[in-house]
Image (cartoon, rainbow, N blue to C red):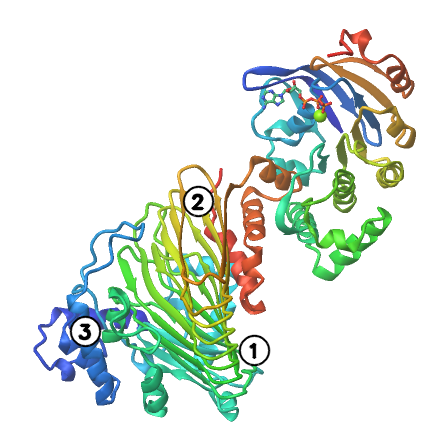
Amino acid sequence: MAATTETVEQVRAVTEQKYKYGFTTDIEADVAPKGLNEDIVRFISAKKEEPEWLLEWRLKAFRVWQEMEEPRHWAKLSYPPIDYQDAHYYAAPKMKDRPKSLDEVDPELLKTYEKLGIPLREQEILAGVEGSEGRSPAIAVDAVFDSVSVATTFKAKLEEMGIIFCSISEAVHKCPELVQKYLGSVVPYTDNFYATLNCAVFTDGSFVYIPKGVRCPMELSTYFRINQANTGQFERTLIIADEGSYVSYLEGCTAPKRDENQLHAAVVELVALDDAQIKYSTVQNWYPGNEEGVGGIYNFVTKRGACRGRNSKISWTQVETGSAITWKYPSCILQGDNSVGEFYSVAITNNFQQADTGTKMIHIGKNTRSTIVSKGISAGRAQQTYRGLVKILPKAEGARNHTQCDSLLIGDQCGAHTVPYIENRNRTARVEHEATTAKISEDQLFYCRQRGLSEEDAVSLIVNGFCKEVLKELPMEFAVEAQKLVGISLEGSVG
Amino acid sequence: MIEIKNLHASVDGKEILKGIDLTIRPGEVHAIMGPNGSGKSTLSYVLAGRDGYEITEGSVSFFGKDLLAMEPEERAAAGLFLAFQYPVEIPGVANTTFLKSALNAIRKQRGEPELDAMQFLKLVREKTKALSMTDEMLKRAVNVGFSGGEKKRNETLQMAVLQPKFAILDETDSGLDIDALKIVAEGVNALRSPERSMLVITHYQRLLDYIVPDHVHVLAFGKIQRSGGKELALELEKNGYAEFGVNEAA
Ligand SMILES: Nc1ncnc2c1ncn2[C@@H]1O[C@H](COP(=O)(O)OP(=O)(O)OP(=O)(O)O)[C@@H](O)[C@H]1O
Ligand SMILES: [Mg+2]
């Protein structure tokens, strides 16, 4: 039986049974029953053999979450209420059921990947899953399949340099002091509805520690995949760059096509100490729903980086083309003097997709600098909002921000909105905001087509040009994929 | 090669082309001259397949095929090229990227193998040099911040790379300085061959000193009013379009 079929069967088996308190023995399939309560939280923690402090932290978060209200008012998003009791909060493929072939993937999705050139990539990753560590690596991968990290490649090579790159559940056992010190230190368990839920029920994710003065020699990458039906995915990523270190981290995501919406509420925390630099790149291609707006991932993500040390730097680069709903504001807390925060974003929404995304730059230290470049592309009936906060606190002498926010509309049924919030409490600080909205012109399309490009290739080329400032920030390996993805996401948007 | 018969076209209900008849055989260069607003660019857009024109009557056959039934990119793949009177800017797209995408899109439609980066670079370098253009211009975004003359030179470069069978040059000479005019004309002449034909739209007989046409046509009021040899251009230069009922002062 194919792994997914088997897992689906197991889920069905589990959900059809009535589970009593203390169901662990019955869960041979490593799937928690639907629903969310303290027992589920305990169950997850027990599955992971977590220390007491972590269980307590999860429970505190859960209790806070129960009192919280879902933020449905301020974001420009509309969707039916989510029934948080109607999902599984833990679903782990048994290790012997690791994905071994592409057979289990929806053929429609496979076609998309073929166009992207991702099958190769996926095979590479699957090869990693199978444990082939022979080739010389350009990218080390941590693959998260549903709730658990199934494999991390090139671990040994990294360990030689003192770099820790593993799943967060492994890190809890391997370096508990680091995890305890930094987990929740950037995004506290009281932060917001989705992040707090994540604290209570996070299942896995990646952990990275780069020791003092080490420049990580390869891209570190996590590949997230939601595979199972009715599963929420709550990964937690924690990256710590110690003094004078550097790391570039890539995050890729895919999910099979399903008619029901699936919830994804991840938390990413970055910590950069003195003179350290973290470059975090995301290409998010979760299933966006079909042309009628049915199905797709609800992506409610909290990403935040703390530039704790002097001269530290955190860059977020994101290419967001997937998900039915995106709610995401990767942010930087610029605490250390002279620290730098950057946010480069391309968000593409087509058909019925909705995205409310942007960033927050909180300037605390002196001479802190931030750059925001946001490129939003809307097509079909999609709605997109850029929401950005630039906050300069009184002690941030000489702080600088530059924000460039460009929207491109394709067709006349979509919308783009820009909502900048600026709070400047230091007179020596300078904040600049520029915004533009444009349409792809008939002239441009015709010019390209006269030269032989199809209408779709023309749109892709023009949009890629529009996004260039952001795409050039991506590591090489990702840039090519991202360019193709830009074209594919907009297929059928003209004509 | 191209046979235009009784072509009528209108924009927003206004008839601009009122019955164009024109046949161009392989290897021929035809020049079209005519007052502002007479429909020269309209004719070139209609031939290239731009949206927004209603063809009310007539036909165009291109290598025996119904040109008007083809998509713009199919026309390009069939060998039709239009050097625009007003080349379009495409921000963020490097000139080389644009050219390579275009060339490979055409090759793909024709079932020819696509050129890889090295092969393309070699080709484009060669053509750039012939047109006295700099590598720097290749790296810049398509037409963005180009001077008027640079844009026209860039159109010529695209033509040289794409090697069309039938090229329409819509006022490619306007905005060029004397030296640039010679260079562009040389570029165009280099493309002249027994298989290739051209339709050169211009206001100035000067261009025709460099690109010597086989036939010259006068387009006014949406119709070809008169056709002749190269000497017709000289005559027009001297007398203007008064003969065709066009008021010079207007
Ligand atoms: N979209 C449009 N709506 C209305 N009129 C139009 C439109 N496009 C072109 N025209 C008109 O059609 C006529 C022919 O225009 P065209 O651009 O073909 O002239 P031309 O011969 O190329 O002139 P020039 O020598 O100035 O380049 C002009 O009167 C112009 O105003
Ligand atoms: Mg004209």
In the image, is B199 to the left or to the right of A216? right
Question: Is residue A240 at all visible to an observer of this figure?
Answer: yes
Residue lying furthest front = A427
Q: Nearer the viewer, residue A276 or A199?
A: A276
Tell me the CA gap for discs 2 and 3: 39 Å
Give me the chain letter of mark 1. Answer: A
Q: Earlier in the sequence, mark 1 or mark 3?
A: 3
**Disc 1 residue type (three-letter):** Ala
**Disc 2 residue type (three-letter):** Ala
State whether residue B76 is above or below residue A489: above
Give me the chain letter of mark 3. Answer: A
Mark 1 residue crowding within 10 angstroms, few (<14) / some (14–19) / many (20+): few
Label 3 sits on a secondary structure element that is: helix
Q: Earlier in the sequence, mark 2 or mark 1?
A: 1
Disc 3: which residue: A62
Disc 2: which residue: A379
Label 2 or label 1, whichever lies nearer to me, is 2
